[in-house]
Amino acid sequence: MQSVLSASSRNGVLERSKIVGILNVTPDSFSDGGKFFDREAAVLRAKEMVTEGADMIDVGGESSRPGSEPVSEEEELRRVIPVIERLVKEIQIPISIDTYKPGVAKRALQAGAKIINDITGLTNPEMRKVVGEAKAPVILMHMQGKPKTMQENPVYSDVVSDIKEFFKTQIDLAKESGITEIILDPGIGFGKTLEHNLTILKHLSEFTDLGFPILVGPSRKAFIGTLTGNLPALERLEGTLSALVIARMNGASYVRVHDVKEARRALQIADAIVSA
């Protein structure tokens, strides 16, 4: 079976950027909390994102916004599994599950999800076992700390070098578990200051020599609001698009976004320039 991640690339960077549409099946996500908590609303939004140009739908049942409280595995399963089971029957693009819990990942794969999006970067050996046994692709993200406290005082000696070393370690551990299809996400906004986020985006190309495609998720993040006059999350579209285009020009292959239609239009131009 052809990999869900296979695509033509140039120097390790995909020739056309891939859009991962965010589907938060939660009551408390930072930008759309509760909007798609209803199962029917979630399914309709996923279908809408497909028509808008999404290449993947990322389903999440636990908010990872700064200060958020974790939810139980049972509650997370209750939120995401029925949505995944519906979507695999009704849309044609791959579904990823945004979770750091091995039990949720395993059930989601059984329900039809194809990709694991782990904000803890496969630091849990049980998660590596689940992903390796399923031979599933994984989005391996960097996060300093935990969502509840990660933004209190993030410190790095060199943010790009530190994240790169983390990736090298986790890639080796992933390979030992039989995981070969990896997307690297430096974790914009996950235990990073505004300056850290800007530095990561500016030097994103430094991650491409690790040999795996890069994903960025700046969509509606707080640093965009700060830079544009403390705008609320729903007014950060223009700033998000600017960050996406910069990321694409600096080597990103995947982008994780709320606003799929607008991101696709902006990235069509960036893709054309990258491929020129």
Image (cartoon, grey):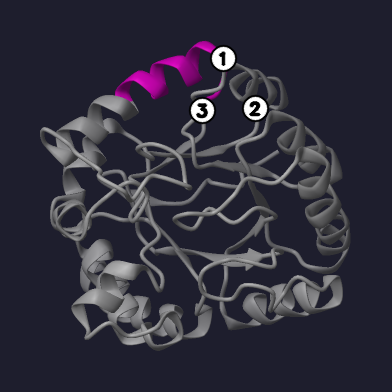
Q: Quadrant of the N terminus?
A: top right
Which residue is drawn at the image coordinates 25% and 45% (left, top)?
Answer: 153
Q: Residue at label 3?
A: 122
Q: Could you give the CA–CA distance between mark 2 and mark 1, rounded to whole angstroms?
A: 8 Å
Residue 251 in percent (x, y) is at 25, 54
Which residue is drawn at the image coordinates 31% and 33% (left, top)?
Answer: 211
Q: Residue at label 1?
A: 177
Asked if the residue at tag 2 contacts the one at tag 3, i.e. Cβ–Cβ closer than 8 Å, the answer is yes
Asked if the residue at tag 1 contacts the one at tag 2, i.e. Cβ–Cβ closer than 8 Å, the answer is yes
- Residue 276 shows up from this direction: no
Q: Which residues are magenta?
A: 168-180
Residue 90 in percent (x, y) is at 85, 68
Q: Residue at label 2?
A: 131
In the depicted view, which residue is nearer to us: 125 or 71? 71
Please state which amino acid type lies under the numbered disc 1. Answer: Ser
Report if residue 226 lies within the magenta region: no
Q: Residues within 10 Å of mark 2 (few under 14, many from 20)?
A: many
